[in-house]
Image (spheres, helix red, strand yellow):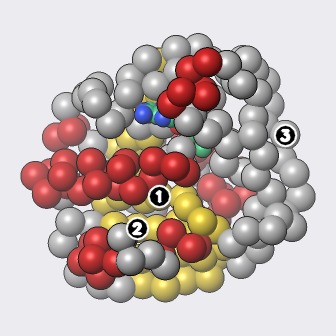
Amino acid sequence: MNKLSKAKKIDFFETPSTVINWIAPHLNKEFNYYDPCVGRGQIPKILSNHNIKVIGSDIRENNIYGKGGVDFLNADYLDYADVQAFIMNPPFSYSFEFLKKCLIIAEKHNQEIWIFEKLSFLASKTRSAVMNEHLEGLYVCSRRPSMYAADENLDLDSPYIEKPMGGTIDFAWFKFKHKPTTKTVISLT
Ligand SMILES: C[S@@+](CC[C@H](N)C(=O)[O-])C[C@H]1O[C@@H](n2cnc3c(N)ncnc32)[C@H](O)[C@@H]1O
C-alpha cells in the first residue's frame, strides 16, 4: 500500500460485475450517473453494457476511468445540475461522509443516490436518522460477493478478475433520495 492509500484510507476494492449487473435493471437509462470514486471504472464499464451512462472521478491520479485527483469530500468536479443520480462503491471508512455530501447536493438538485455497502450500513445509531429520513430502497444481494483489495497499479484495460460469489459479508445497494416517496426492499438475484 502506498503512502496516499495509508493516509487517506483509499480502500480500493473493485465492485464485482455480478452485483452491478443485478442493479442495472433498477436504474434509469435516461439519467446521467456520476461515480465520484470510480477507480478503474468497474461501475461505468459494466453499466455501459446496459446502455446506462456514468461519468467518474477519483482521488487517485493514475489508472482512473475519468478525472483523477478529485477528492469528492473536499472538491467539486462538475456542475451537479448535469447529473440525475450518483452511483458508487465508496471507500468503506468514508461511506457516510460520501452519503452526507450527496444528500446536501440532492437537496438542491434532487438526485437519486445509489451506494453499494455492507448490509450492516443500515444498522447504526449514528446513521439511524439519515436512514429513516432518506432511504428509499434497499436492494439486498441474495448471495455474498467476494471482495478483495485491488492493485492500484493495474491499468484501465486490465480485466477485473471476478471471484466466485461466496464471500463472508452481506452487501446491498442502498438507494437514497433527499425526499423519498416510497420504501422498496428487493432481494437481488
Ligand atoms: C471501494 S473502491 C471502488 C472503486 C470503483 N468504484 C470500483 O467499483 O471498482 C473506492 C474508491 O474510492 C476512491 N477514493 C477514496 N477516497 C476518495 C475521496 N475522498 N474522493 C474520491 N475518491 C476516493 C479510491 O481511490 C477507490 O478507487
At horizontal 36% and vertical 70% (from top left) the residue drawn is 126
Q: Is residue 166 left or right of residue 76?
A: right
Percent position of residue 177, x then y: 27, 66
Query: Gap in Å between the C-alphas at discs 1 and 2?
Result: 7 Å
Going from N to C along the chain, the mark reached first, 3 or 2, is: 3
In the image: residue 36, left or right of residue 7 = left
- Mark 3 CB in 8 Å range of ligand 1? no
- Which residue does the numbered mark 2 point to in the structure image? 175
Which residue lies most toward the left here? 108
Q: Which residue is label 1 attached to? A: 115
Quick one: SS at disc 1?
strand
Amino acid type, label 3: Ile
Residue 77 drawn at (x, y percent): 29, 25
In the displayed structure, 83 sits above or below 68; it is: below
Q: Are marks 1 and 3 in contact (CB under 8 Å)?
A: no
Residue 9 spot, x, y in % from top left: 56, 36
Tell me the amino acid under the disc marked 2.
Lys
Residue 31 at what x, y percent from top left? 34, 50
> Looking at the image, which is closer to me, 4 or 138?
4
Q: Is residue 76 above or below residue 161?
A: above
Q: Amino acid at mark 1?
A: Ile
Earlier-in-chain disc, 1 versus 3: 1
- Residue 136 visible (yes or no): no
Mark 3 element type: loop
Q: Are marks 1 and 2 in contact (CB under 8 Å)?
A: no
